[in-house]
Amino acid sequence: MKKLSFKIGMLFFIFILFIESMLFFLLYFSIVNERVQSETDNLLARGMSHRDVLEKNFDTETIKHVALMESEAETMVVITNEKFEVLKASNEVNDDMKQLILMGNFVDYSHHGMTIESEWKREPFLATVSPIRTDNNIKGYVFMFLKTQPIRDMIHNLSMEFFIVGVLAFVISIIATIFLSKFITGPLIQMKKATEKLSKGESDVMLDTYREDELGELSRSIQKLSDDLDQLKKERTEFLSSISHELRTPLTYLKGYADVLNRPNLSVKEREEFITIIQEEASNVNTLVKDLFDLARMDQNEFIIRKEQVECCEFLQEIVLRLKPAFEEKGVSLHCFCKKSIFITIDRIRFGQVIHNFLDNALKYSRSDTHVQIKVLKENQQIRIQISDQGDGIPKSDLPRIWDRLYRVDKSRSRATGGSGLGLTIAKEIIEKHGGEVHVKSVLGKGTTFSIYMPIEGL
């Protein structure tokens, strides 16, 4: 009883049953009243027609003729004088008819005629009366009678027909409700099973995504979630595999050179060389673990950004001053072009990490006698920080993936250059947490340009 299909089915069934009942009752009583009213109006009109004839010729022959006309009809006519004494009748006048006629002694009848008995459920006759006037004097009355038993029989037959149709409508409503509830809840049940599979870690779900209604939209959302989870699962596997590789290599070096250091016949120079290698690899492991820790904090929304308003040019010049010796050592010129009094709201340490990362990549992939430039431009309520180099460039096929974790464009140089493949991922995350965006353009063999767009708004 707690199933959604049952609840929806009962709701539809009650609603349809209520509408059908209302329509049946309204239609039934409308037909009944219309038929009874039609019979009454016809009876009154027939009586007034006879009255009109008798007003022109109120004589014995005309009276007999009118009575004769009704003798073969379902209706009956009784013609009386002004004292309600019967002059002529098309059929035998019984006690019920006499009682209705004698009521005229106590009623002032309208010349237009009127209904004197309309209770078809209990009385044996419907009855109307039309006064006969000549020279403004009442000469008599035309009473019309119609037996109510045929009307009751007709209403009974009509009731039976409505009952049969009602039963059929009831059965059809139940069948329609079952199919309708299944039609609605069927996709929901499939979605429920799909979500259960997803909760168990199974991502191979297939749903009907071709519907153009809300259920179709929900199916597409769940299907997309399934595909995203499947992709995330693959990326997680690849990520863990890459992390294992990244850690295994320096740890292998550390263990290998540590074992070598235990040899008694090493010279002082060899020992110092091996110790230097061990320190470098330990530094690489430390950097990798730090980057992983930062990414984990970002994923858990625990990466804190402490913003302050800084003068952009001064901020960048400080970074350039610290890194310039490394650029000069490789023969790469580094210049910063920016105007004074351009302020930006950032976390100095975190945003400095971003600029340092971009400049470090520019240095690694630039040849001697090339240039690296930083430009700051103010445009469209944004500040654009552009970092350009004349290095190796990035292949077009690799551009969409450079922000992926542990992804390297030049895998053969990754160990030599010491990168972990996490720097650009972290840089992008930091920029977005500042409310900014980062874009990259690159031409293979000519260089790469990173553009950081930051809002001008204050804290």
Image (spheres, rainbow, N blue to C red):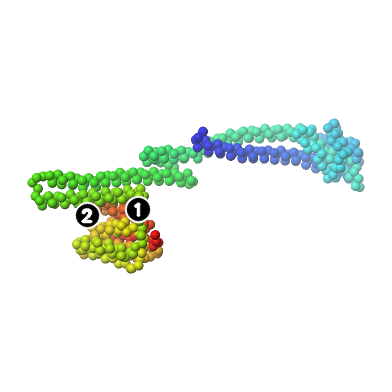
Amino acid found under the numbered disc labelled 1: Ile
Q: Which residue is drawn at 36% across and 60% down?
A: 308
Give percent across and percent down for residue 13.
Answer: 57, 37
Left or right of 229, for residue 356: left
Residue under label 1, please give it: 304
Give percent across and percent down for residue 459.
Answer: 39, 59
Q: Is residue 180 visible?
A: yes
Amino acid found under the numbered disc labelled 2: Thr
Q: Residue at x 15, y 47 (%)?
A: 257
Give percent across and percent down for residue 312.
Answer: 33, 64
Quadrant in the rendering for residue 113 = top right
Q: Can residue 209 be seen in this view?
A: no
Mark 2 vs mark 1, CA separation in Å? 29 Å
**Disc 2 versus disc 1: nearer the observer:** 1
Q: Up-down: is 299 above or below 150?
A: below
Along the viewing direction, whichever of 425 and 193 lies nearer the viewer: 425
Local packing at callout 1 (Cα closer than 10 Å; few below 14, some 14-19, many 20+) is few
Residue under label 2, please give it: 417
